[in-house]
Image (cartoon, grey):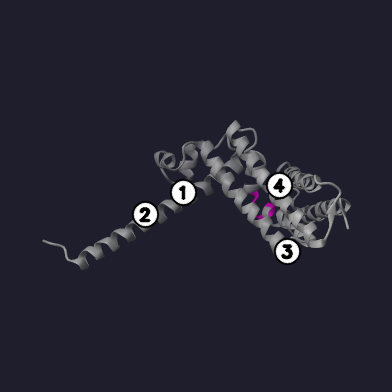
Amino acid sequence: MKKTKTSVVAESNALSKTALRRQREREHRYESILTVAEILFAREGYLQASMEKIADSAEVSVGTLYFYFKNKEDILVRLLDKISFELRELLGSEFRKADFSLDGIKRAGQFFFEEFCIKHPEKLTIIFKESMGKSAMVEEYRKQIFDRLISDVQEALMRLSENRGLKYQSSLSPELMAVSILGMYERIAYHFLIGQDRSKELKTISKDTVAFIMGGINNLCRQ
């Protein structure tokens, strides 16, 4: 029987809906696997979390897991990409909301400790601990992530000087401060939250760290 134009359109629409549904299912499964891997990597350790264990926890077959990811290292890299994007968005949002002012620098520090660290302990553990020393490829990826974060902070410091009519002690000052700020974030989070659970003291830790950073910025600025 020859198909009418109406039946062809209806069939095409049905196929489109099926394709969209399958795409949503694939995206949901991809995100579910990443969520499970994030929890396992953080709680049990990257080396202990096998592909079989990830597949079992995500309720998919090992074959399905390999359909989405080449290997466990690939999962880690995808997680790092996702976590770094969320962290950059969090910090950048505070810079932008405060129009790249000192208040924006201060609020970004507070949000890092009091929002990101407390609400996302698994992400914190992966980016600052479980991704360290795993392979040359992962290390290079981590370097790129931290380079981008440093660049974000450096840009915020440059915008700050432009908005307030300030000059830094030298042309290296913004980069030096950006590297120092990210280094402090990393080591303080690792020392107080990953190495030991001092989360109950986090507001004090956040306040003192931000005050230290603000003092350094003010010390390297001049009218």
Placement of the C terminus among the 4 image quadrants = bottom right
Residue depth check, mark 3 versus mark 2: number of the one nearer the observer? 3
Name the residue type under label 3: Asp
Q: Position of residue 96 (x, y in %)?
A: 69, 62
Q: Which residue is mark 1?
A: 30
2 or 1: tag closer to the N-terminus:
2
Task: Relative to 83, say whether 134 is above or below.
Answer: above
Q: Secondary structure at mark 1?
A: helix
At 75% from the left and 57% from the top, the residue drawn is 159
Nearer to me, 73 or 85:
85
Q: Which residue is mark 2?
A: 22
Is 57 displayed left or right of 84 in the figure? left
Question: Could you say which quadrant of the image residue 107 lies in?
Answer: bottom right
3 or 2: tag closer to the N-terminus:
2
- How far apart in space, not on screen, are marks 2 and 1 (Cα)? 12 Å
Q: Which residue is mark 3?
A: 99
- How far apart in space, not on screen, are marks 3 and 4 (Cα)? 18 Å
At 63% from the left and 41% from the top, the residue drawn is 144
Labelled disc at residue 150: 4
